[in-house]
């Protein structure tokens, strides 16, 4: 991938006020592939004449025959990102068409993934990063209709200018008139709430809150709380109400919040807004 030609009718400046410049380039030079998943590849790119890099996510299915599904997911993600605007959400700069397919252009997270940032000695406190994430969740849950991220875990938490931003809305759902529109797929299994693992239709703001509770422990421990990646093992552990052990250095208020967030019954979990209030209070 050498050069991406942007299609002007698809360009958008949504979310760019959080950036040091406005996206108006017609070409983006791809510097390197930095990440890939089941439905997409992320490149680090550069707009000519600009000093800040961008992230370009291209729809690309790993499995044969799934390319249309990959493009559908990316289009849905673009539509969602174009309508959200929050300092705790990765800044969406535009949608483009290129030889490789549909692409999303987003701000480049200079601090990388949150666990890598922390392991490299990043200066922002873990409690502050967790507050950034739950603030973003409170925002998307407050929208009308509300949005459920559906895949909160460390690889989807990036660091931009020393603050955490929520990224990758590819598995998100929109709750409209009691109906959840979007991906029914689960993300990382050890972050899924019991009601999500138990069957389809379980995603809700409460399941995002559950995932935040698990995230809060992993940012301190640095390791996944369930070592097995076998779906059946994750299902049995979570449904039997096992939960992470307390890391030695976690603050008391974070630990107490985490325990409230990962309760088995979704209705007993606090809202993201309430958790944010606890952390800032």
Image (cartoon, rainbow, N blue to C red):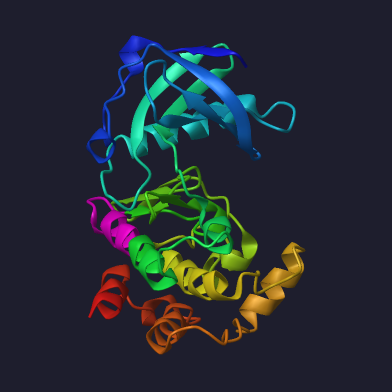
Q: Nearer the viewer, residue 123 or 174?
A: 123
Q: Position of residue 153 (x, y in %)?
A: 53, 60
Q: Nearer the viewer, residue 12 or 130?
A: 130
Residue at left offset 45%, top offset 80%: 258
Q: Nearer the viewer, residue 76 or 167?
A: 167
Residue at left offset 57%, top offset 87%: 248
Q: Is residue 57 magenta?
A: no
Residue at left offset 44%, top offset 30%: 53
Image quadrant occupied by the C terminus: bottom left
Q: Position of residue 29 (x, y in %)?
A: 51, 17
Residue 76 in view (yes/no): yes
- Chain part drawn in magenta: 135-146
The number of discs equals 0
Image quadrant occupied by the N terminus: top right
Residue at left offset 51%, top offset 68%: 215
Q: Position of residue 48 (x, y in %)?
A: 41, 15
Q: Position of residue 54 (x, y in %)?
A: 44, 30
Q: Is residue 192 above or below residue 75?
A: below
Residue 200 in view (yes/no): no
- Toward which corner of the image does residue 270 lie, by quadrant? bottom left
Horizontally, residue 10 falls left or right of residue 259, namely left
Q: Is residue 138 magenta?
A: yes
> What is the magenta segment's predominant secondary structure?
helix
Q: Is residue 214 above or below residue 56?
A: below
- Toward which corner of the image does residue 123 lie, by quadrant? bottom left
Q: Nearer the viewer, residue 194 or 103?
A: 103
Q: Is residue 53 above or below residue 261?
A: above
């Amino acid at each position: 991938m050498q050069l991406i030609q942007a299609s002007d009718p698809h360009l958008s400046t949504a979310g760019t006020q959080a950036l040091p410049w406005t996206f108006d380039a017609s070409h983006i030079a791809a510097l390197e592939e930095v990440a890939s998943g089941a439905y997409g590849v992320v490149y680090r790119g550069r707009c000519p004449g600009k000093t800040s890099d961008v992230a370009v996510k291209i729809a690309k299915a790993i499995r044969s025959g799934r390319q249309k599904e990959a493009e559908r997911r990316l289009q849905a993600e673009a539509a969602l990102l174009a309508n959200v605007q929050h300092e705790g959400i990765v800044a969406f700069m535009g949608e483009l068409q290129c030889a490789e397919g549909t692409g999303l252009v987003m701000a480049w997270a200079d601090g990388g993934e949150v666990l890598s940032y922390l392991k490299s000695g990043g200066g922002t406190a873990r409690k502050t990063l967790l507050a950034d994430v739950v603030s973003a969740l409170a925002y998307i849950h407050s929208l009308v209709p509300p949005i459920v991220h559906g895949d909160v875990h460390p690889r989807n938490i990036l660091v931009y200018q020393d603050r955490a931003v929520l990224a990758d809305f590819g598995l998100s759902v929109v709750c409209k008139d009691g109906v959840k529109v979007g991906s029914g797929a689960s993300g990382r299994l050890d972050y899924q709430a019991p009601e999500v693992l138990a069957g389809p239709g379980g995603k809700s703001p409460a399941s995002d809150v559950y995932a935040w509770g698990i995230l809060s422990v992993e940012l301190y421990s640095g390791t996944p709380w369930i070592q097995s990646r076998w779906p059946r093992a994750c299902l049995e552990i979570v449904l039997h109400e096992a939960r992470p052990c307390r890391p030695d250095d976690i603050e008391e208020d974070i630990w107490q919040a985490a325990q409230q967030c990962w309760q088995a019954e979704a209705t007993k979990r606090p809202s993201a807004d309430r958790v944010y209030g606890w952390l800032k209070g």
